[in-house]
Image: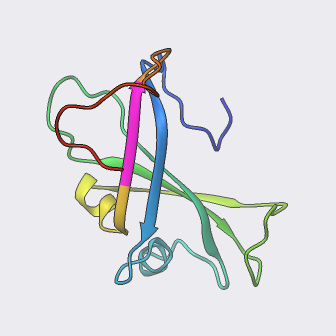
Amino acid sequence: MDTFTAGVQYNDFKGTVAADISDNLSITEHLASLGKVKNDERVVAFRITSSGVRGTQVTGVSLVAYLSNSKKFEPTPEFVRAVEIRVTPGEALAFFKRFDLVAKRDNVDLTATRIDGPHYD
């Protein structure tokens, strides 16, 4: 599995995600408050995972942040450092002002399907 491509054991559902950074709470600042960020490091990627759920409420997820220490954003950094923290699902979503995750059953083509009910364009 590619580190920067989502995947789970069976991949029953696959999709995409998009997120807008919160104006009030950043992953980098939160990690700095925990002593997890070195000087001049910034988050260039993140992963949120949950596993082992057996139909019970999820109270914690893993958030892995990938940090680069370049002065500016580089399109292809040579090296990133990964740090992991445990947060609640609500804490994970608080880092974003908008978060959109769309997943569909693998091998189902919905491109020409009409939707009856709530949906977002």
Point 47% across, 18% down: residue: 106
> Residue at the right extreme?
78
Q: Does residue 103 belong to the magenta stretch? A: yes
Please tell me whether residue 72 is drawn above or below residue 9 in the rendered image: below
The magenta segment: 100-104
* Residue drawn at (47%, 73%) of the image: 31
Secondary structure character of the magenta stretch overall: strand
Quarter of the image for residue 27 reads bottom left
As drawn, is 90 to the left or to the right of 105? left
* Residue at x 40% of width, y 26% of height: 104
Q: Quadrant of residue 21?
A: bottom left
In this picture, is 96 found above or below 15? below
User: Which part of the image, by quadrant, shows the N terminus?
Assistant: top right
Q: On the image, which quarter does residue 5 sit in?
A: top right
User: Who is closer to the viewer here, 116 or 44?
Assistant: 116
Judge by depth and name the residue closer to the eye, 111 or 43: 111
Name the image colouring: rainbow
- Coordinates of residue 119 in the picture (x, y in percent): 26, 43
Question: Which is more toward the observer, 35 or 62?
Answer: 62
Image spot of residue 22 (x, y percent)? 38, 75
